[in-house]
Image: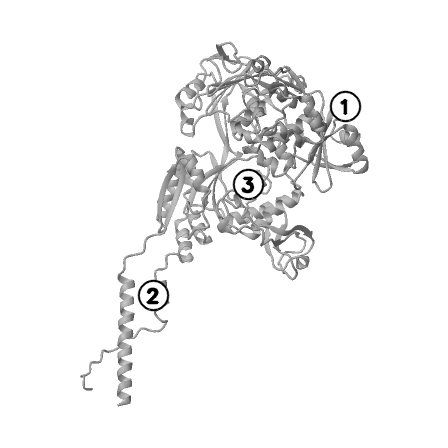
Amino acid sequence: MLAAVQRRKIVVGIIVAIIIIGGIAAYLLLRPAPPKPKIRVFYNAGNVERERIATALAAEWGKLGFEVVVQSMEWPVYLDTIMDPNAFDVYIIGWAPDYIDPDDYAAPMAYGGTRFTTLKTIEVTTAADVANYLSSAKVFEVENSWYVVVGPKGTGATVDIPTGAKILVVQYEVDEVHTLPIENSTPWITIAPSMYRNVTLDALIQAGVIDGDPTHRNAIYQAIQQITNHEVPIIWLSQHMLVRNHWTWVNGWYYHPVMPIRYDLLWEQPDTPQVEIGTLGGGAAGTPTVKYYNNKSVIVIATIGWPESFDGAFTYETFGWEILWETGDQLVTYWRTETIYPDKDLAIAWARTEDASTYYFVIRGDIKAYNRWVDKISADPEFGGTTQELYNISALDVLFSIWRVGWLEADPSWMVTAYIDYNESKVLTEDEFNSLLNTTPLIAEYKGQTAQVSNLSQLLEFFGSTNISTANVVELKLTMPYPAILAILADAFLSVVPMKYVFDAIGWNYTQALLDIENGKKIYNLAKYINKTAFEEEKSHRLLHKYPIATGPFYVYDYKDNTFIILKKNPYYWNATLYIENPNYGTIDYVIFVIYDETAPRLSLYKAGAADFCYVPRANIPEVNGTTYPDTPYKINIVASPELLTFDIDFIVLNTYRYPLNISLVRQALTWAVPFEKIYKEIYEGLVAQLYGVIPKGMLGYTEKNIIKYTYNLTKAKELIKASGIFKTSAAIESVIPAVPIVVLPLIVRKKEE
């Protein structure tokens, strides 16, 4: 009887198990298919190119099994959205450089926010040496027989590196306390726009800042390039070609990837036709309203937009910086096509401490700033001060200009506040600086040469500046050693403004201010005059926004908002000897920007010969290119060359904080499913080159070694999606049903009494 009961329980258990398993299997087999993972692709409204790219991505990524939604947003909403990691999946955006250095790309676009208590770079001679510094290691083979080895501080790491290779060790210890959790991070501010964090990558990015050796930095950024290429937290889309676009009567054209052409270094053919531009004048300067003509002494640019400001402390866009480059001077500059070695400008020599924490700049004497607004300022009730036509430039004016940008904290100020301790910087006399050199020799670097100097004469001789008059010395304290500090100081937003001009125009007491700041020893005391809480209503900004002053080859002769800007040759330009050395230079008397946001009238002006340069949308290039001027050999020449690349890039940000974009195989699959060639040909009109990582071609750290050159390959993309496992529908069944053979058991029916 007991055995029968037990048999009955077993049979009932089997039947129940079969029913349960069958029910589960039926549910899993017959239930509706799960929804496809959704990817939202955002772009800013009005940008037709990005709209077309987003549409192309949706079509191809849909073939991988995703539901892709394309959505446009107005620019302010777009900016808010991409700063919220919970609000976006994918978006398309671009980047133009602030200054010439790979850190201006790697840090904002790839740094994951990891903090370090220890971070060092050590060059070693053998692979065995690595064990003395790291507990584990990741190895990157880069160009010129260099290997970059990255890992946590410790001992025992083993690496396989050939004998004779050059090895750079990057040693780190993570600061867990001060590293912000990813979920609390903000894209573009405390973490990369993709929300991607990789400790190895972060250590390399920081190493590129602390190691000032150009050879080491090149190897470090090549390793960074490899990681950003393989991990694709961002799909690196394109690098823009430079489009040479002007009438052929213009000569002297040259190329620089960041700085615009200096128009005083161009010249036109003697028989350049004279063509009416239109009636201009009557702007802010009250110049006569007359007809202007384009001819051999005039450069005309037909363009769009308007400068954000003529004040370097507030303008953070291309047009505003172009005006400042034509009308201003900075501490250092890049001469014509040079991108590696900064050259002399207002500074005729410079040197640094051995640890690169402090720089000293000897300022050129006999520099005059030209103020064409004397009458306008005195009659303006907002200012009303008595100003001079000419102001001398000295080290105090240089420091005032840098301090003011940092203190006002407007858009471009981050480049000052991040790297320059502007409140602790000061002005030295030549004697004070010479005494410092006598006791503390400094390091001078110029055009690839290095020397230790122990007096001012020696420094000036090293720079070839012995017979140039001087106007004191700026001591610039840095917040940390930064290899790209000279590149920042060459930027247009740091154009030098005479402090006395500002004080005279506003009516502040300049003599008292000099006492307050002890002639530049306590520059921070200027805070009692410059009220940064007023922001755009701050007095010095209002002045420079309205009445820009000039030290450069041109000055602002007149302007009318959103209509025209007329620059005129500066009669007091300090470097006019250039025009004697090369008679072609300095032949341009006027540079005129005429603003036409509508395409048709702008192109009409250009094709008529009334403009020498013009903004031509890609789609309109075929109709404009080759236009000839009647009865002359001259024509419009629009040429793009793959060898002349700007540092402007476009890319597709993937939110690695969200599933499934947090999976590297998925990101790689999406990259292989981008129709690169179609986008380049049909959307960019063939005017871009492919971008493989965060470093653009032509910049320090660019490499194609060990780089994946992604192309459109849907088969490979599908293989990677399959390998990622994100679409495995059998996962739920496998978790319920044991991994044993399924056996069909007979159903046994017994009578009740049995």
The C terminus lies in which quarter of the figure?
A: bottom left
Crowding near the residue tagged with mark 1, few <14, some 14–19, many ≥20 C-alpha atoms within 10 Å? few
Determine the image quadrant of residue 727. bottom left
Q: Nearer the viewer, residue 199 or 232?
A: 199
Q: Nearer the viewer, residue 127 or 374?
A: 374
Task: Judge whether residue 265 can be spotted in this image.
Answer: yes
The numbered mark, 1 or 2, whose residue comes first in the sequence reads 1
* Residue of label 1: 467
Query: In the rendered view, does 1 fall on the left or right side of 596?
Result: left
Q: How many marks?
A: 3
Q: Position of residue 642 (x, y in %)?
A: 51, 35
Disc 1 and disc 3: Cα gap in Å? Answer: 40 Å
Task: Judge whether residue 333 can be spotted in this image.
Answer: no
Look at the numbered discs 1 and 3 and tell me whether their residues touch, using CB distance below 8 Å: no
Q: Position of residue 614 (x, y in %)?
A: 47, 23
Tag 2 secondary structure:
helix
Q: Nearer the viewer, residue 66 or 441?
A: 441
User: Looking at numbered disc 3 in the image, what kind of residue is underneath it?
Assistant: Tyr
User: Looking at numbered disc 2 in the image, what kind of residue is underneath it?
Assistant: Ile
Q: Say which mark, if any, is on residue 105.
A: 3
Crowding near the residue tagged with mark 3, few <14, some 14–19, many ≥20 C-alpha atoms within 10 Å? many
Q: Is residue 267 above or below residue 455?
A: above
The numbered mark, 1 or 3, whose residue comes first in the sequence reads 3
The N terminus lies in which quarter of the figure?
A: bottom left
Disc 1 and disc 2: Cα gap in Å? Answer: 86 Å
Q: Position of residue 488 (x, y in %)?
A: 61, 34
* Residue of label 2: 733
Q: Is residue 11 above or below residue 116?
A: below
